[in-house]
């Protein structure tokens, strides 16, 4: 990639002391669009707000204002009740500016991306997640942050990889939209400018490494190969892996064979595979294993079909076996799934909130399906984080709203929905394991919890959620007014339901329970909100 001065460098007006804002305003001035890449969600939101404040709303063209108004409605209606984040985004969208990150809901992200493609959103301030696999008409990619906080190595602020820079820079000037584009990095000093040119313009991209080198991936693929009868012994396994990119990079086939042999014995100890003859012979050497037939057990096949990490499956099965005859609680199940690798990143416990988390842990400690490690053990932090993750989901099924989750746990709606979806998949996995082990009482509790997690409700609302068009808010209104199940819905009057749910939903609910309401007359004007069928049909 050749380094080149900006085509419009001389004409960029320094209307503020912020280079990012100046570039964004100039992009709009020349009739183009830009992606502003920042390091984190908070920065994306603040940068978008800073840019939007510099745009006079009266200068926004009427046609653009109308188009952005539709996007604004989508942003505000994405949740049953808009959060402060939704309102901030809507305020930016009014002026053709938006922020984009994993904390937004899928419908909000889609609306912003579509608005950008149509030219209605001019500037998107985003995290690097938007740099991968998205084709957008961005003339400029303004890369604001070239350093990011990292917990690896020495920790602290570290330079982003060259590959990541290339991904972000590659969003500018897509062939489908522009003849050329501008990828712009901001430097505060001449020394910074030289360092950026040396590292990112002239630098070499980092090597790509095979994901098979990561143990969870290797465990999962190895079990899948055996469960599908694609390989039957270690000789066939080694033949398969010798053709992979992992083997090409690893080169030391003897060490690779040792790693695979170790994994096979781990899967056998979990009860997911059998090694023919190993029961009587004890430990099987690598040479012997090459001739021994490998088979997946019934549980092992189900683990492979569910595509869950065998280590996670073993952890969940062990936890379920520890359930008492009295049953298992919702919190215990949430903590079980919250402690898995698949739920990472977990919610991290901050020092100032540790005492509160420990207090809440004490309330549920006797219900847990796993032992609490010693505070001096290396996995204690992960355990405490799993407690916070479980508390976050527990508050959701206790009918706390998105604003509460955002303020209390710093988890945005898009992130929370991703967590709930992942937890639902893991709970389904636990349900399948319980079926294999014929733990019928646990199956019942898991099914209930999955319903509660989907809608974010307490257990008493589950019967009402069977009705289409009834979610957590409407169900709670009905329950609080004495309508607690389908039988109560049948007995309730149309007027009462209409006052609680609205006319259209009330009529639809009555039809769902098989009640013919045609010809029913509801007294008019008895009190505020009361309606009749004649009034409804005349609309």
Image (spheres, grey):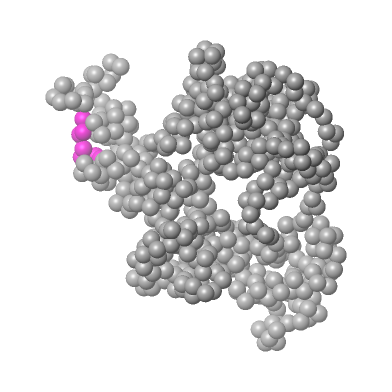
Judging depth in this view, the residue of 481 and 39 nearest the camera is 39
- Residue at (32% x, 44% y) in the render: 464
Relative to 162, does residue 312 appear above or below in the rendering? below
User: Viewed as shown, does residue 202 lie left or right of 223?
Assistant: right
Main SS of residues in magenta: helix
Q: Position of residue 360 (x, y in %)?
A: 37, 63
**Whether residue 427 is visible:** no
Q: Position of residue 362 (x, y in %)?
A: 36, 68
Q: In which quadrant will I find the N terminus?
A: top right
Asked if residue 33 is among those painted magenta in the image, a careful observer would answer no
Please give the count of numbered marks on the rendered protein.
0
User: Viewed as shown, does residue 96 lie left or right of 454?
Assistant: right
- Residue at (74% x, 74% y) in the render: 261
User: Viewed as shown, does residue 312 lie left or right of 158?
Assistant: left
Residue range highlighted in magenta: 488-496
Judging depth in this view, the residue of 331 and 268 nearest the camera is 331
Relative to 195, does residue 429 appear above or below in the rendering? below
Q: Position of residue 358 (x, y in %)?
A: 40, 65
**Whether residue 383 is visible:** yes
Q: Furthest-left residue in view?
A: 526
Asked if residue 494 is among those painted magenta in the image, a careful observer would answer yes
Judging depth in this view, the residue of 265 and 409 nearest the camera is 409
Where residue 221 sits, quadrant-wise, is bottom right
- Residue at (51% x, 46% y) in the render: 415
Relative to 426, does residue 314 appear above or below in the rendering? below
Judging depth in this view, the residue of 214 and 314 nearest the camera is 214
Q: Position of residue 229 (x, y in %)?
A: 71, 64
Q: In which quadrant will I find the C terminus?
A: top left
- Residue at (79% x, 69% y) in the render: 256
């Amino acid at each position: 990639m050749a380094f080149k001065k900006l085509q419009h460098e001389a004409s960029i007006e320094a209307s503020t002391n912020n280079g990012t804002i100046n570039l964004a305003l100039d992009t709009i001035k020349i009739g183009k669009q830009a992606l502003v890449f920042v390091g984190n969600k908070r920065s994306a939101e603040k940068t978008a707000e800073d840019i939007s404040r510099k745009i006079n709303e009266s200068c926004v063209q009427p046609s653009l204002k109308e188009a952005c108004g539709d996007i604004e409605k989508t942003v505000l209606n994405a949740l049953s009740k808009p959060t402060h984040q939704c309102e901030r985004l809507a305020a930016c969208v009014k002026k053709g500016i938006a922020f984009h990150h994993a904390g937004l809901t899928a419908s909000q992200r889609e609306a912003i991306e579509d608005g950008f493609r149509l030219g209605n959103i001019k500037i998107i301030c985003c995290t690097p997640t938007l740099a991968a696999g998205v084709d957008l008409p961005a003339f400029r990619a303004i890369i604001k942050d070239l350093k990011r906080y990292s917990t690896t190595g020495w920790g602290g602020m570290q330079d982003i990889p060259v590959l990541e820079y290339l991904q972000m820079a590659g969003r500018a000037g897509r062939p489908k939209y522009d003849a050329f584009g501008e990828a712009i990095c901001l430097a505060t000093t001449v020394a910074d400018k030289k360092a950026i040119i040396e590292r990112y313009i002239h630098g070499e991209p980092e090597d790509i490494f095979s994901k098979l080198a990561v143990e969870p991936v290797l465990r999962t693929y190895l079990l899948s190969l055996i469960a599908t009868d694609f390989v039957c012994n270690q000789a066939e396994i080694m033949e398969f892996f010798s053709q992979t990119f992992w083997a090409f990079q690893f080169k030391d086939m003897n060490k690779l064979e040792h790693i695979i042999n170790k994994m096979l014995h781990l899967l056998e100890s979990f009860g997911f595979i059998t090694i023919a003859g190993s029961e009587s012979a004890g430990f099987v050497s690598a040479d012997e294993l090459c001739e021994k037939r490998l088979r997946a057990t019934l549980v092992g096949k189900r683990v492979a079909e569910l595509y869950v990490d065998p280590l996670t499956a073993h952890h969940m099965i062990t936890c379920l076996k520890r359930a008492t005859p009295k049953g298992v609680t919702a919190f215990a199940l949430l903590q079980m799934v919250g402690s898995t690798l698949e739920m990472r990143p977990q919610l991290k416990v901050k020092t100032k909130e540790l005492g509160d988390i420990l207090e809440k842990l004490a309330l549920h400690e006797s219900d847990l399906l796993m032992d609490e490690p010693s505070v001096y053990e290396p996995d204690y932090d992960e355990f405490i984080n799993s407690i916070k993750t479980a508390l976050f989901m527990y508050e959701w099924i206790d009918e706390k709203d998105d604003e509460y989750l955002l303020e209390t746990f710093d988890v945005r709606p898009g992130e929370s929905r991703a967590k709930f979806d992942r937890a639902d998949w893991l709970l389904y996995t636990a349900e399948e394991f319980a079926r294999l082990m014929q733990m019928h009482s646990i199956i019942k509790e898991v099914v209930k919890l999955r319903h509660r997690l989907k809608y974010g409700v307490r257990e008493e609302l589950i019967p009402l959620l069977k009705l289409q068009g009834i979610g957590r808010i409407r169900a709670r209104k009905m329950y609080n007014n004495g309508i607690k199940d389908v039988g109560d819905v049948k007995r309730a009057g149309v007027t009462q339901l209409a006052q609680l749910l609205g006319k259209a939903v009330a009529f639809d609910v009555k039809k769902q329970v098989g009640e013919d309401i045609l010809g029913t007359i509801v007294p008019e004007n008895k009190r505020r909100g009361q309606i009749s069928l004649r009034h409804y049909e005349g609309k």
